[in-house]
Amino acid sequence: MYDYTAGKSDWMAAGLPTEGEAAGRPTAATVARRDVPVCHLEESLRDVRERVRAAGWDACVVVNEARIVMGLLHAEQLGRKGDLTAESAMRPGPSTFRPHVPIAEMAEVLAQHDLPNAPVTTSTGKLIGLLVREDVERAAHERHA
């Protein structure tokens, strides 16, 4: 048996404040949009689409009752027709990133994999926000300018 004790990495992965050389540098947590629309597995895709578009978004994070990320709905999935639920239309199990990842690293990952956005979660999978590629590229550029 092993008693796990949280350490520095867990602190940073939770997006909590840090000190020292890395403090103040943009990270996934500081750039992620926290106002991203969320929906639940059983919701009607039609209702989700209307709510997401009315909010000016083209993406929605599908979460469970505990805000654990279950999937993503991008414009392509949101545009699907028929009597679908968010669960049947979503892209399940998206790659998620921890809050402490430096924004320059996130810019590389999003560009390399041609991702329009990426969820930022705690180590337990709870949604913190959504990184939008344009925001990430702008923050990475400003950091190096």
Image (cartoon, rainbow, N blue to C red):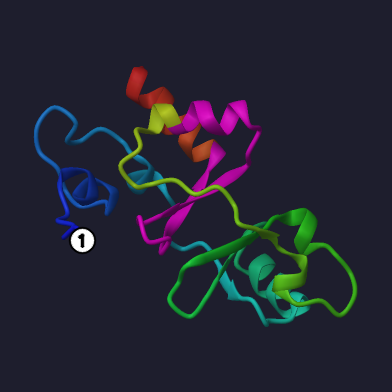
The magenta span reads 106-133
Residue 124 is covered by the magenta coloring: yes
The magenta stretch spans residue 37? no
Q: Is residue 14 above or below residue 35?
A: above
Q: Quadrant of the C terminus?
A: top left
| 68 relative position to 78: left or right | left
Which residue does the image show at 46% across and 63% down from the upper left? 35
On screen, residue 49 above or below 4:
below
Front residue of 6 and 137: 6
Residue 67 place in picture, x, y as percent: 45, 72
Q: Amino acid at mark 1?
A: Met
Q: Does residue 63 sit above or below 24 in this rendering?
A: below
Residue at left 35%, top 37%?
101
From the image, tell me which residue sits under label 1.
1
Q: Residue furthest right?
A: 82
With 41 as the anchor, is 23 left or right in this view? left
Q: Is residue 52 left or right of residue 110?
A: right
**Which residue is drawn at the image coordinates 53% and 30% (left, top)?**
109
Q: Quadrant of residue 52?
A: bottom right
Residue depicted at 17% across the width and 35% down the height: 23
| Label 1 neighbour load within 10 Å: few <14, some 14-19, many 20+ | few
Q: Which residue is farthest left?
A: 20
Q: Measuring from the top left, give residue 103's x and y in whole percent.
A: 39, 33
Towards the viewer: 28 or 56: 28
Residue 62, given in percent of the width and then of the height, sits at 59, 68
